[in-house]
Image: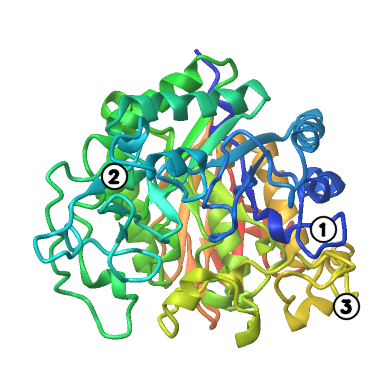
Amino acid sequence: MNEQPWWQKAVIYQIYPRSFQDSNADGVGDLNGILDRVHYLSRLGVDTVWISPIYPSPMADFGYDVANYVDIDSIFGTLSDFDRLVKALHERGIRVILDFVPNHTSDKHPWFQEARLSRDSPRRDWYIWRDPQPDGGPPNNWLSVASGDSAWEFDRTTGQYYYHAFLIEQADLNWRNSAVRAAMYDVLRFWLDRGVDGFRVDTIGRLIKDAAFRDDPINPNYQRGEAPFRRLLPLHSAGQPEVLEIAGEMRRVLAEYPGDRLIIGEIYLPVQQLVRYYGPNLTGVHLPFNFNLMLVEWKPTAVMRLVREYEAALPAGAWPNWVLGNHDRPRVASRLGAAQARVAMVLLMTLRGTPTLYYGDELGMMDTEIPPDRVRDPFGLNMPGTGQGRDAERTPMPWDGSPNGGFTIAEPWLPLGKDHIVMNVGAQEPDAGSMLSLTRALLELRRREPSISLGDWAPLAVEGDVLAYIRGRDGRRFAVLLNLGDVPRAVRLGEDLGGPVVLSTHPGRTGSAIRDRIDLGADEAVIVRLAS
């Protein structure tokens, strides 16, 4: 029997490099800063590090506007710095995933600069250009996700509009052009040759647009106060079936290299649509990111319904994955509260599938209030009052209780949270009851127990308003019981279930024996090793 791919039992740790560690006193995190914290990553117990964009960029969208796909922005360091970081991580058994941004380039990228010179430019068809409507207006009604305004920008030099799904400075590539595909696949090979173990593909669902450029339909459920781009349903500007062909081509590029290289797709979709991105016969992305746990109502019935639906929808042989936080969404502790963030961490690490952990969530970091004069995110600046600003969840990692949290000796690019004096790595490391210690214990349990990292999942019917399920493999079973509320719950497990508690979010519980009943405290999660 073939051994399962490494990424099925891995824990992925997302680093937003601007905010992890500054090594050169400019207030912005960098690659050498990550290198300085490799020991922390190893001690935490993560298996894989995903690094958000580090390519040369004008930073209109903080790296998601790429001006050169095969180099490192000087803000973050050099290619030599990157090579040293990969080597150091690999020496500790930690793999490296890069953010790949194929939907669009910066308008400063040489490809786009050449494309906009004239309609006859050799690279003109590398981007999406359309003639104006008879009245001079944009070609259709598609909206920018970064502003809610038209996603078309008029170019006076050539008299046509170019398409940008996000900022004006981010021109969409034409993935129907085979030359674009070949160039981008060579980008993947460049980084694979440098030892990268895989890619997270940014906004993969938008790579192909409707060939007829039909208008997107009105969203009948749009509510005043929502982000303005939600006025339309992206039926034609995204989600075209040809994307699966591209995903398959990317996967074949990765298959040219040894070691089960991984491709993850960023897709915000309900599970029934999400699972299509595994592709026919699992020829698409290995892991279409499942963000639904960030959006579900935080109640046992709703979470259980989501998990059941996802498990049932997975194609045969597909491997699940779960995400509770990232650089685009409010932090877990801010959404659920500090106590439930601990319960959520147990959930994330014990569901079947590959978990992704966002930097700082292992501390219980919360969103930081950003003063108006410190707002940096273009989404927040373009759509004030709609909750689209992302600065609050991108603030620097607090390493200690010093004024700038040990992140930098300069003015940090975003302010640290006021609670960093006590909410930091140095304060939590010696505390056995801290969120950091809980996270380390969970990662160690996953590493030690294949039942948790690779085992089967089954819902557990219990009396009591809690979320409960069993993980099992090769006759070894664990019950996971999570109280998603702030009042104690008495839970009856059944006469044939019981065993020692191997982990709890509450102190003093580990090691105690459970027979057929357990009294869960408010905001408590417990893992019980069941008798065979």
Gap in Å between the C-alphas at discs 3 and 1?
Answer: 14 Å
* Picture disc at residue 22: 1
- Return the residue at label 2: 128
Q: Which is more toward the observer, 225 or 479?
A: 225
Where residue 358 appears, x then y in whole percent? 62, 57
* Residue at numbered disc 3: 403
Q: Residues within 10 Å of mark 2 (few under 14, many from 20)?
A: many
Using the rendered view, name the quadrant where residue 385 is placed.
bottom left
In the rendered structure, the answer to whether residue 108 lies left or right of residue 73 reads left
Q: Residue at x 68, y 51 (%)?
A: 442
Taking the image as shown, residue 153 lies to the left or right of residue 192, namely left
Residue 494 visible in the current orientation: no
Label whose residue precedes the other's in the sequence (1 or 2): 1
- The tag earlier along the polypeptide, 2 or 3, is 2
Q: Is residue 86 above or below residue 160?
A: above
The front one of 253 and 178 is: 178
Q: Residue 339 versus residue 124: which sits nearer the camera?
A: 124
Secondary structure under the numbered disc 2 in the rendered image: loop
How dense is the environment of label 3, judged by Cα within 10 Å: few (below 14), some, or many (20 and up)?
some
User: Which is nearer the N-term, disc 3 or disc 1?
Assistant: 1
Closer mark to the observer between disc 1 and disc 2:
2
Neighbourhood count class around disc 1 (C-alpha, 10 Å): few under 14, some 14–19, many 20 upward: many
How far across and how far down the image is residue 238, in percent?
26, 50
Horizontal and vertical percent position of residue 337: 58, 78
